[in-house]
Amino acid sequence: MPVFDLSTTPLRELNSALHALPQGANDTQFEVINPRGSHSVAVGVDAAVNVDVKGSVGYYCAGMNDGGTITVHGSAGPGVAENMMSGTVVIEGDASQYAGATGRGGLLVIKGNAASRCGISMKGIDIVVHGNIGHMSAFMGQSGHLVVLGDAGDALGDSLYEAKLFVRGKVKSLGADCIEKEMRPEHITVLAELLEKAGVTDVKPEEFTRYGSARKLYNFNIDNADAY
Amino acid sequence: MSYHNPYTPPRKSATFDDYTLAEIRRAAATGIYDIRGGGAKRKVPHFDDLLFLGASISRYPLEGYRETCDTSVVLGSRFAKKPIRLKTPITIAGMSFGALSGNAKEALGRGATIAGTSTTTGDGGMTDEERGHSETLVYQYLPSRYGMNPRDLRRADAIEIVVGQGAKPGGGGMLLGQKISDRVANMRNLPKGIDQRSACRHPDWTGPDDLEIKILELREITDWEKPIYVKIGGARPYYDTALAVKAGADVVVLDGMQGGTAATQDVFIENVGMPTLACIRPAVQALQELGMHRKVQLIVSGGIRSGADVAKALALGADAVAIGTAALVAIGDNDPHWEEEYQKLGTTSGAYDDWHEGKDPAGITTQDPELAKRLDPVAAGRRLANFLKVMTLEAQTIARACGKNHLHNLEPEDLVALTIEASAMAQVPLAGTSWIPGKGGF
């Protein structure tokens, strides 16, 4: 198993090795030690590799991940798993702002809390946060699911498109055009699957409230100007 | 004695002119501001206000058609392993599939490729046709991240991080529902027919320090191969250029207020940002002070229409230019051929700017398949290539007259200004004097 010690090895060598992996390679287990808050750790992964990062990372860890399974045994800085295409990213600790921003696919699991703008402009990614999320989360979320076991901060789902939000705890306030919605059986099913994939076993889908778009701002109407 | 009151003609207000009165009535009737495409239409100091001096006893010219005047340019030589090499310094600015029809994007790619230059994607992602028809394609990285993915990042020839554009520094965009076809909707991960808001700032970074980290991420994803441009609107060109360089840009793209947009509020287009002419010298000064002039290349856009404009932008210190509106006109936008249809839309050729409505008679700013069919991408591409060649020849003609064997050898000393305003902005002397306002020498 290749081990990259970022206290002695340049970041370039790690990402270069991850990108150079040939199709069908056997050696798909990577370990990163001493990340010490490095930015752009394991970005642009485009193969089914497993990367274990032993420590906390800076900005954009697992950015644009496409098929990799990346686990951070620590906390993550801003923009973790931004624009993820597919695969799985797990943060054992907390995540800073913009977690999963613009993500298009895959699963992001944050076992601690996530700061503001979690899932901003999400476009298909599934995000499960065990703790709380900060303000303006899922801003302009287009599709995908954001599941929060704890509480959500101010202006949840502001200017939301078709992303589906499930919050188990309290929501401080909803953003423009975001409303509470009925939890129908199909949502229970989807949520149960997401919880299972995220390794959550002691929580029932029925404990969550669903939020989504009221779709009143989908086409510009001057009479809605006060909503902005 | 009877007094006869002599006739005086009715006098209209210069402040409340006919256009202003009509706009007040339009706003009162509709309750919404005017949205349109294009760049600033107001008259601002521009390249027309500059003249080249040409050769004289102290400067000797080069022979036209015989002595070489090189037009090539390398973009992205600072950090990228694979910098871009172009035959002409006139590039095609970013315009999206969505705002433009597929045929229009293909025509731009074809024309640029024949002429040996690059074209640029826009807000909405990269299409296979666009990639296929563009030998050199710059992939825009925009706040909305519509259509953004690592595969396209890697098959691009350069990446352009868009911070702002000249038509609307500080503003986002809106592609109205009528232009959202199935394909456009799919590329943008949104339902068909709804308005698509393009955010005004990036979702995962704010400020120059973050930008530096974002550039690092994009370089790491693309293995440091691709040149990374940073595009800024003409707002604070000195500071924005310096900050882009500090953040690690290979190329700075600077877009003045005459630069076009697919759709923005008219009040924004006409009242925010600075004229292109006022932006170039502060940006060049920033590069020079950092020792980065010609190392970080500067691409200037916003109202470039001819080889003379190209030569003037380069003489002021740019390495290349980008054209958008002029390229659309070259492929057929606002062509008098469609005058009857422009009249039906309540406008006239040369003034049509309701690009967001998707009813373009020329088939360019539309997603209507019947209208789009009107544009033959092969013939339109040829027209663009012709136009690019003419512009390049014109710039060479001027450069040779100034004794330069490369367009990049043009310099401010070759220029004078016709007006005090242009003199102050371009920082070249008022014609016939040695005076540059703000620089002494009066």
Image (cartoon, rainbow, N blue to C red):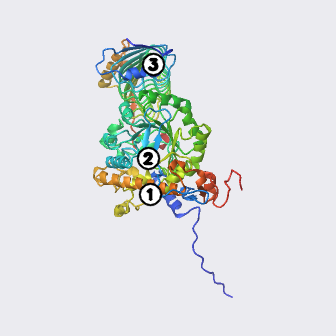
In the image, which is nearer the foreground, mark 3 or mark 1?
Answer: 1
Secondary element at tag 2 = strand
Measured as percent of width and height from the top left, residue A165 is found at 39, 26
What amino acid is found at the position of numbered circle 2 in the picture? Thr
Residue A47 relative to residue A226: left or right: left
Most foreground residue, A103 or B47: B47
Characterize the local packing of mark 2: few (<14), some (14-19) or many (20 or more) Cα atoms within 10 angstroms: many
Measured as percent of width and height from the top left, residue A34 is found at 49, 13
Measured as percent of width and height from the top left, residue A141 is found at 41, 32
**Location of residue A211 by image quarter:** top left
Secondary element at tag 3 = loop
Q: Where, quadrant-wise, is the N terminus of chain A in this rendering?
A: top left
* Whether label 3 touches label 2, CB < 8 Å: no
Of the numbered discs in the image, which one, if any, rests on residue A150?
3
Q: Is residue B164 above or below residue B332?
A: above
Specify whether residue A168 is in view.
no
Q: On the image, numbered disc 1 is attached to which residue?
A: B65
In the image, which is nearer the foreground, mark 2 or mark 1?
Answer: 1
* Whether label 2 touches label 1, CB < 8 Å: no
Give the letter of the chain under mark 2: B
Of the numbered discs in the image, which one, if any, rests on residue B282?
none
Q: On the image, numbered disc 2 is attached to which residue?
A: B91
Most foreground residue, B119 or B199: B119
Characterize the local packing of mark 1: few (<14), some (14-19) or many (20 or more) Cα atoms within 10 angstroms: few
In the image, which is nearer the foreground, mark 3 or mark 2?
Answer: 2
Give the letter of the chain under mark 3: A
Characterize the local packing of mark 3: few (<14), some (14-19) or many (20 or more) Cα atoms within 10 angstroms: some
Residue B336 relative to residue B419: left or right: left
Q: Is residue B112 above or below residue B42?
A: above
Residue B120 relative to residue B288: left or right: left
Q: Residue furthest bottom?
A: B1
